[in-house]
Amino acid sequence: MKLAELKDHMQKSVEATQRSFNTIRTGRANASLLDRITVEYYGAETPLKSLATIGTPDASTIVIQPFDMGSIGTIEKAISLSDLGLTPNNDGKVIRLNIPPLTAERRKELVKVAGKLAEEGKVAIRNIRRDAVDEVRKQEKNSDISEDEARDLQEEIQKLTDQSTKRIDELLAAKEKDITTV
């Protein structure tokens, strides 16, 4: 495995962790909260963002305007059944989601969720590292590379791993700050 390829894999893990963080609710309205929501539309599970325009007119409201007004009821139902804990308000044309301020207890829970997501990202990076190191050891065993080259590659792999886990820690710190800010 080439180092550029390895770096790319690790970067993708960091980006996946970032996307996971975006789905965690903070005290402010954010359209990415609805990224995970799928709606049964004509018998197929369809992402909400494919069925409607999602906007945030102010810090505490998300407005969903369906392209097909016939789907407004199913969109409302999908949001109600989701784990967001938000109640949709349907006025016939748009669905409004009021984002209530988070309680201190809920903030603590969300910080734990963010920590868990960060750990999952780090585990993915460590798995990538393990596979790369195994590959280097295999090449060394087959005499494809020297012992010194193997050691240098392993050090480089560890540096990439450290950079990626540090980036996840930075993202986690920013998300925790975002969650705990009242």
Image (cartoon, rainbow, N blue to C red):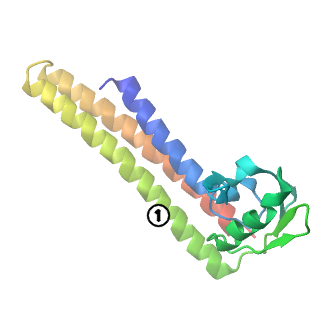
Q: Is residue 59 above or below residue 1?
A: below
**Which quarter of the figure has residue 15?**
top right
Name, please, the residue furthest toward the front: 42
Above or below residue 32? Residue 161 is above
Which picture quadrant has residue 98?
A: bottom right
Q: Position of residue 139 (x, y in %)?
A: 15, 25
| Label 1 environment density (alpha carbons within 10 Å; few <14, some 14–19, many ≥20) | few
Element under disc 1: helix
- On screen, residue 11 above or below 99: above
Q: Amino acid at mark 1?
A: Lys
Measured as percent of width and height from the top left, residue 39 is found at: 66, 59
117 relative position to 25: left or right: left
Whether residue 60 is visible here, answered yes or no, is: no
Q: Residue at x 61, y 62 (%)?
A: 176
State left or right for residue 151 relative to residue 109: left
Q: Position of residue 116 (x, y in %)?
A: 46, 64
Taking 133 as reference, is 5 left or right? right
The image shows a total of numbered marks equal to 1
Residue at the image position 8 percent from the left and 27 percent from the top: 141
Residue at which label 1 appears: 116
Q: Residue at x 37, y 40 (%)?
A: 161
* Residue beneath the point at 75% across and 70% down: 182
